[in-house]
Amino acid sequence: MNQVKIPRSHPRYESLLLREKIIEGYKKGIVVLPGLIAHGRGEAFDYIIGEKTQDFALKAIEAGVAMLLLAERPVVSVNGNTAALVPAELARFSELTGIPLEVNLFYRSREREEAIYKWLKMHGAPKILGVYDERIELDGFESMRRIVSVEGIYSADVVLVPLEDGDRTEALKKMGKKVITIDLNPFSRTAQKADITIVDNIYRVLPLMINEAKRLIDADREELTRIVSSYDNKRILSEAILFIRDRLTRLGEQGVFV
Ligand code: PTJ
């Protein structure tokens, strides 16, 4: 397929750019075919929330970063779509906070693991687990995601699992871990089960997480604890769903979308 040059003036510029990133990721062996479908589902929800970071996401981002900074052994789990969309931002966040990345795939193959490792390294990620270090199989779920790094997800107290299929969050929670997710679909199992759900496009979220980490990195533990303990994920999910309802009602009444 030929690379399409997208003019900056195009009203759907960012959305088309993300498609290109996913397609490029597929060609490089980073993204799997079902990842293209997952991206389409995300796009639909992004359209519905107005392709902008809303208040409910900003609150979740603040709490998520505070929780990661408070953690003893935090880790960021990276799948194919995440690696394709925000590799440099993941590397920057990891460098800034000292939190390692871990390659953890649903559709796992040695080639993909190594391709993602190389891709993240190329973008400057300082520490990438789950590929060349010691690994172990977790009990409690069937998918290939059960293969985790001993130093990373296995030992972690807080795990960020962006763009996640359903089966893992509950299993991680049963192991006593806190789970933060980034998911445009507030109805997904992961969104509903996580401790903190950032309902927004990962492409907009990672730069905001980097800014938030810069702001909070020197905050004292009391301040971080206050942010985390005043956060209520049920309320945030309600806000997201009610926002969708109200926006659709408004647009429906106007009879126009753009
Ligand atoms: O790389 P692998 O092998 O680990 O596989 C990755 C995929 C994404 C294929 C796998 O995890 C999967 O099938 O995921 P699901 O079940 O489709 O869930 C992905 C979730 O991410 C859905 O709820 C989407 O709405 C959401 N999503 C997709 N794109 C974005 C997104 N959320 C935030 N930002 C996006 N850009």
Image: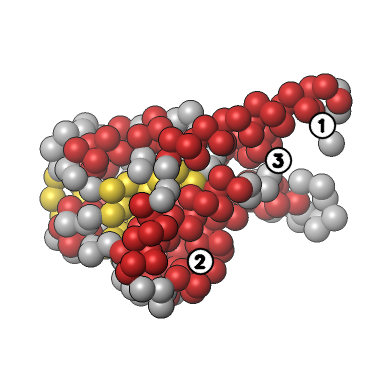
Q: Which residue is mark 2?
A: 212
Q: Position of residue 215 (x, y in %)?
A: 50, 72
The numbered mark, 2 or 3, whose residue comes first in the sequence reads: 3
Query: Vertically, is 161 above or below 73?
Result: above
Which amino acid, mark 2? Glu
What residue is rendered at 19% in x and 45% in y?
176
Q: Which residue is mark 3?
A: 50
Whether residue 230 appears in this view of the structure is yes
Q: Which mark is residue 92?
A: none
SS for callout 1: loop
Q: CA distance from mark 2 to mark 3?
A: 22 Å
Which amino acid, mark 1? Phe
SS for callout 2: helix
What residue is rendered at 23% in x and 64% in y?
72
Query: Vertically, is 253 above or below 151?
Result: above
Q: CA distance from mark 3 to mark 1?
A: 10 Å
Q: Which mark is residue 257?
A: 1
Q: Position of residue 59 (x, y in %)?
A: 52, 51
Q: Position of residue 64 (x, y in %)?
A: 42, 55
